[in-house]
Amino acid sequence: MVETRGTTGTASAAAFRQRLRLVSGLTLLTFAFTHFLNHMLGLWSLEAMEAGRELFLAVWRNPLGELLLVTAILTHVALALWKTARRRTWRMPVWQWIQLLLGLAIPYLLIPHVIGTAGLAARFGYADTYRNVLTIFWPGLLVNQTTLMVLVWTHGMIGLHFWLRLSKVYRRWFPWLLSVAVLVPVLASLGWIGAARRLALVEQVPFPLTGEMITWSDPLILILQRGFFGLLALVVAAILVRTIRRRFAETITITYPGGRTLRVVPGPTLLEVSRMNGIAHADVCGGRARCSTCRTRILAGGDSLPPPSTQEAQVLARIGADDTVRLACQIRPTAPLKVQPLVPARGAPRRNVTSGDAYHWGVEQPAAILFVDLRNFTGITESRLSYDVVFLLNRYLGETARAIEACGGYVDKFIGDGVMAIFGMTDGIQSGCRNALAATNAIAENLEHLNVELASQLETPLRIGMGLHAGQVILGRIGAADGGNLGAGTRITALGDVVNIASRLEAASKELGQTLVVSRQVLRIAGYSCDAARETEIEVRGRSRPMTVYAVTPPTPLREALASPTENAAE
């Protein structure tokens, strides 16, 4: 019990450090952004830059602003070094490598700039105006300053992107925000470089630094840079000590799907264990507990893990996970575990069983399932030649599949004259439900056009029935267990009670005299409401209680509910 509380405290401390790192990083990014805006004024004139500098200094060069800035710098650098020292694997996504290397390079390059401006101003009363600073920078320090600006901005934008990337608003505005992110350092560089060139051509400003200033600043810069290298050396030493200790420490076993068993030293998170051993494990937020893509079902040994921290519990609650599901980035195994990652890692090879293709072993996640079936197809084909039957069926199935894929769905399979589709495999259950509802409208519209096109060949128009339900399903490459059937191994299918219910709702559409029967669960997750007059209850085989559904005929206008839509799956 003591160990559990200690581990829980460690997780809470890690979450607190992550929040501190985020807040300090946002503070530094705000400082850099306002500083760059000041540089942009050089596109107009040096006088505009000096006027902007007065406003900039009013915000940042006062006791409160300086305290906030210095605290943010020390906190951010210290936490970065701490996290680096505690890192147990160097197998990381490229973006994490870039952010790490930039984060370590920036303090070294920033020290001369800070000492040469704010440091001299505090020590000697040096006026670090743009006129003086640009005289020093141009042209000898052009490359140094531009490189520093690009590194600072790139580091900040990477962090900001991976903090916001799961936000729907951010994804919607991403192209515009990306343009702004590129323009800011470009315009800032053009601003100060243009002002520096004009200043050198128009005025002969004397070199503003005195010998006393240089004698004080140059040794201090060297000492601080060497001190930073010393901290990096301590980080490397900590990593080496931990690596050596792991060789002599007791190990535990972690068993992955397919019976692959690893012997590891307690300490790393489960996500780090996967990375250290080359096992593909989905991870969007970089192990910060901001997403749920590293979620893993603990098949055995879960009682040895401490309860989730507040941050992990919030993420798990958002996806409706049960007690057996944990975030791999947050748990640190101290006893043997048997685990199953629930979200497939992108880019994992499909044919290699041990590569971490989670679909090979089965992934449990929420999704929306749509069944579409052609009514009275047997009667339509009775008097037709086989060629006509195939032609007609292909035209109908092709239009249906196109509508599904255009709305972000995945065609699971064709079942005679029926289609089964999956929505929300990669973009979340809420988007999946919304896209599935949009697909029912698109399918109905495509069928209407097809009936017009084939009117001369049909005695009666083609009619369809559709059933739509959502909840937890199992996604897997059925038939790919031995890797010998390439066709089976390349398709993903859905299994589970949700699939069976969706199929039964499609059958009920005929009895209810409407084209689509959709469960209330789908509308609730999508955040939509429907005319109450279309609500009904039906008996579904295998369920003890009647199920509330809506029987409609697409295209169906649905109203967006005023309440915040849930993203949880059906229970």
Image: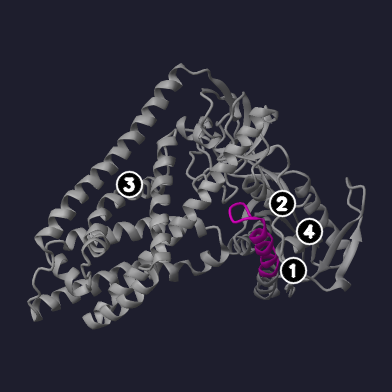
For image coordinates 73% across by 75% down, the residue present is: 557
Distance from the alpha carbon under mark 4 to that under mark 2: 28 Å
Q: x%, y% of residue 50? A: 26, 78
> Tag 1 or tag 4, which sits nearer the N-term?
4
Residue at 67 percent of width and 56 percent of height = 429
* Above-or-below relation of 427 to 304: below
Q: Secondary structure at mark 3?
A: helix
The kind of secondary structure the magenta stretch mainly shows is: helix
Quarter of the view holding residue 312: top right
Badge 2 is on which residue? 416
Stretch in magenta: 424-442
Q: Residues within 10 Å of mark 3 (few under 14, many from 20)?
A: some
Sequence order check: which comes first, mark 1 or mark 2?
2
Q: Residue at x 40, y 40 (%)?
A: 84
Tag nearer the camera, 3 or 4? 3
Q: Is residue 81 left or right of residue 551?
A: left
Q: Residue 466: percent from the left, percent from the top?
A: 76, 61
Question: Can you identify the residue that label 3 sits on?
Answer: 104
In front here: 321 or 48? 48
Give the residue type at disc 3: Leu
